[in-house]
Structures are given as structure tokens and as C-alpha cells.
């Protein structure tokens, strides 16, 4: 990919290549089959060369970025740091430590709490979910509350509750560091809920947790 990028930039510095590229791509797109003198083509291409080069480089960088957007290996971390590969239909539980690539994620607790006196939950209850994440990789990891969605037993998506004096759970986790925080949801009373975490919005990978509130 890098070699192709360098060759592309080198080709764009050639006047002959400019005319070839212009004839092949730019002229039909902008002017149909209208005959244009070579001097006009070269002048037009030189004027727009910077924008075209930026577009090509941007598309190549974006393509390389997409190549790395694949599903991460997922495993449950057990005592002794031995792991069991996740089954596609498996749901993790509160207290499980889940290894997702170079990161670890766990739902530490789930419980009903009192909401604000003046901001009552529309569905009747406020569910507090405590989350902990650890970055074991060499790059920064971004863990935000919008990576999570909560559903009731009927499959209805539930909204967050913001009537609690607590900072939003979001931000950068540097390599070798960890983060802990809470997400609050406006929920109907139920014995269990489903929490879905998406490690990467560019893939369809989902990590599912069976959330049973403590008594």
C-alpha cells in the first residue's frame, strides 16, 4: 500500500502522466467527449493537482484504516489467566472479565438506585451499571458510554438517565492504564436486561452481557 502511494505521487509529478490521467478520468467526467487542446488539459490539471493528490492520499489512508477494522478475538478471563473462546451466542455475566483483543472489559455491578427528586425516571426505575476497562495494548483505547446499549426483556432499547450527579463515562484510556465508571439507564423493573457493547462501530461485532440487578 505504501509503495503504491509513493508511485502514485511520483506519477503525478510527471507532465506526461498528467495528460494521460486527465484524458482517462477528468476529461470524460467534466467535459464528456468534447475535444480540448493538450495545453488546456495540462493547465487545468496543474491547477487542480493539489486537490486531486489530497483526495487520492486521503482515500488510500482511509483504505488502510479500514483494513485494520476487523473483529477482535474475545475470551472470558478465568483464574490463572486461562481463557475460553467465546461462543457466538454466549452472553457474559456481571463479574466476568472479558478479554477483547488487547483490552479487558468487565461489568462490576448492576443495581437499582434512587433518581433525582425533580427528574423522575419515565419508566419507573434507575439502573446503575458499573463498568471497568483495562488497556493492555500499545495504543490508546477509547471507551465511551455510547459504545453500550441496554435492552429490556422484550428487546426494547432503553435510554440513559442523566438525573444523577455523576460525570459521563467516556474518554481515552492510555496503554497499560484502566478506567472505571458508571452508566445510568431509565428502565422498567425487570429481573434481567441485555447490555450490548460494540468494540468498533465499523464492524458488526457485539459483546453481550446478561445484566441481573443485585437485590
Image: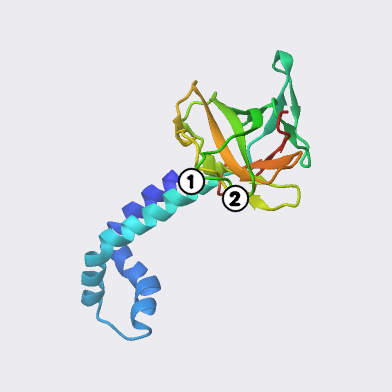
Front position in the image: 184 or 81: 184
Q: Which residue is mark 1?
A: 65
Check residue 122 in the rendering and tell me which mark sits there, or answer none.
2
- Expressed as whole percent of the image width and height from the top left, the position of residue 21 reads 36, 67
Looking at the image, the residue that sits furthest to the top is 80
- Expressed as whole percent of the image width and height from the top left, the position of residue 99 reads 65, 28
Asked whether residue 149 is in view, the answer is: no
Q: Nearer the viewer, mark 2 or mark 1?
A: 2
Front position in the image: 26 or 150: 150
User: Which residue is rendered at x = 26% and y = 59% of the image?
Assistant: 50
Asked whether residue 12 is in view, the answer is: yes
Left or right: 97 with respect to 46? Answer: right
- As helix, strand or loop, the secondary structure at mark 2 comes to loop
| Mark 2 neighbour density, 10 Å: few (under 14) some (14–19) many (20 or more) | few
- Asked if residue 144 is positioned above or below residue 96 in the image, the reply reads below
User: Which residue is rendered at x = 33% and y = 82% of the image?
Assistant: 31
Looking at the image, the residue that sits furthest to the front is 117
- Expressed as whole percent of the image width and height from the top left, the position of residue 18 reads 30, 65
Left or right: 57 with respect to 121? Answer: left
Q: CA distance from mark 2 to mark 1?
A: 41 Å
- Expressed as whole percent of the image width and height from the top left, the position of residue 112 reads 65, 34
| Mark 1 neighbour density, 10 Å: few (under 14) some (14–19) many (20 or more) | few
Looking at the image, the residue that sits furthest to the bottom is 34
- As helix, strand or loop, the secondary structure at mark 1 comes to helix
Amino acid at each position: 500500500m505504501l509503495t503504491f502511494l509513493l508511485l502514485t505521487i511520483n506519477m503525478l509529478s510527471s507532465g506526461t502522466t498528467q495528460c494521460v490521467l486527465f484524458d482517462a478520468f477528468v476529461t470524460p467526467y467534466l467535459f464528456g467527449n468534447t475535444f480540448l487542446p493538450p495545453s488546456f488539459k495540462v493547465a487545468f490539471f496543474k491547477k487542480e493537482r493539489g486537490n486531486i493528490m489530497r483526495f487520492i492520499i486521503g482515500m488510500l489512508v482511509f483504505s488502510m484504516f479500514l483494513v485494520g477494522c476487523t473483529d477482535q478475538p474475545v475470551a472470558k478471563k478465568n483464574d490463572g489467566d486461562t481463557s475460553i473462546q467465546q461462543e457466538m451466542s454466549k452472553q457474559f455475566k456481571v463479574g466476568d472479565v472479558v478479554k477483547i483483543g488487547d483490552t479487558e472489559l468487565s461489568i462490576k455491578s448492576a443495581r437499582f438506585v434512587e433518581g433525582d427528586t425533580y427528574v423522575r425516571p419515565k419508566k419507573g426505575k434507575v439502573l446503575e451499571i458499573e463498568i471497568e476497562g483495562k488497556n493492555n495494548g500499545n495504543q490508546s483505547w477509547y471507551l465511551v458510554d455510547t459504545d453500550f446499549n441496554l435492552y429490556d426483556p422484550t428487546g426494547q432499547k432503553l435510554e440513559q438517565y442523566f438525573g444523577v450527579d455523576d460525570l459521563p463515562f467516556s474518554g481515552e484510556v492510555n496503554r497499560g492504564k484502566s478506567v472505571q465508571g458508571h452508566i445510568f439507564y431509565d428502565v422498567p423493573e425487570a429481573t434481567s436486561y441485555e447490555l450490548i457493547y460494540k468494540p468498533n462501530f465499523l464492524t458488526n461485532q457485539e459483546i453481550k452481557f446478561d445484566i441481573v440487578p443485585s437485590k
